[in-house]
Amino acid sequence: MTEETGEPAATPQGTVSEAAIAAALGQRSIVLVGMMGAGKSSIGRRLAQRLDIPFVDADTEIETAAGMTIPEIFEARGEPYFRSGEQRVIARLLDSGPQVLATGGGAYMNADTREGIRQKGVSVWLKAEFDVLMRRVKRRATGDRPMLQGDPAQRIAHLMNERYPVYAEADVTVMSRDVAHETIVSEIIAAISPSLGLRPPGEAAE
């Protein structure tokens, strides 16, 4: 949908339609992975609107299941407890497709979660450069981001080095940058089409 009119955005000529994407998903989910600040929630909501399927934020579901915020879970129970709950919640959500599922920054680091996503979803890494992440994180207090306690710049750099090689295992990679969200949504749709066995009209099969 366009933000100005609320009407579905027109499908550019030579691209796969949103309806075809949604149909090809079947019961699978589109799973967004990437760092905090990569735009998984904001872009994910717009992607779900375009495809007319539900949007689900895994972190919100974890908080609902625990009856606590994520910072409270980290403080009261620790990160291992949180990660265990995160794995269980995402496994449950993957049985609820089709949907656009935004995951927390560390979720894809779990091997069992990655395997579940491979079996029941199409993974999209929203890849962002360091400067983009820093600008976005600075707009929000870091109190609600337990993994950024201390020096945010140092933590982000450390997490990028640790996580980016694993994120790279995702089915497709789309750059998250400071452009209109609809632009990135269109790039995601184009990128996942081959993974779903779809080709733009007029493009011959290889």
Image (spheres, rainbow, N blue to C red):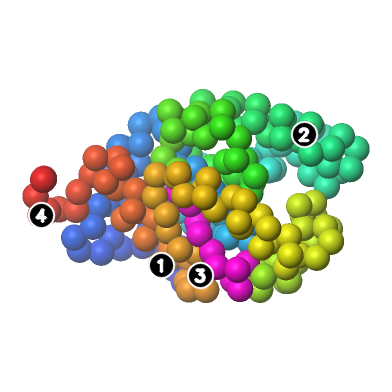
Spatial distance from mark 3 to mark 4, Cα to Cα?
30 Å
Residue 158: x %, y % from top left: 68, 58
Q: Is 188 situated left or right of 44 in this image?
A: left
Q: Which residue is mark 3?
A: 177
Spatial distance from mark 3 to mark 1, Cα to Cα?
10 Å
Label 1: element kind: helix
Q: Is residue 166 above or below residue 190?
A: above
Q: Is residue 188 above or below residue 198?
A: below
Task: Residue at 60% x, 35% y: name it.
Answer: 110
At label 2, counting other C-alpha atoms closer than 10 Å, the crowd grade (few under 14, some 14-19, many 20 or more) is few
Spatial distance from mark 4 to mark 1, Cα to Cα?
23 Å
Range drawn in magenta: 124-133
Indicate which disc, 4 or 1, sits on the residue closer to the N terminus: 1
Q: Which residue is mark 1?
A: 183
Q: Which quadrant does the N terminus fall into? A: bottom left
| Residue 98 in sight from this viewpoint | no
Indicate which disc, 4 or 2, sits on the residue closer to the N terminus: 2
Q: Amino acid at mark 3?
A: Arg
Q: Which residue is mark 2?
A: 80
Q: Quadrant of residue 27?
A: top left
Spatial distance from mark 1 to mark 2, Cα to Cα?
37 Å
Q: Is 172 situated left or right of 147 in this image?
A: left
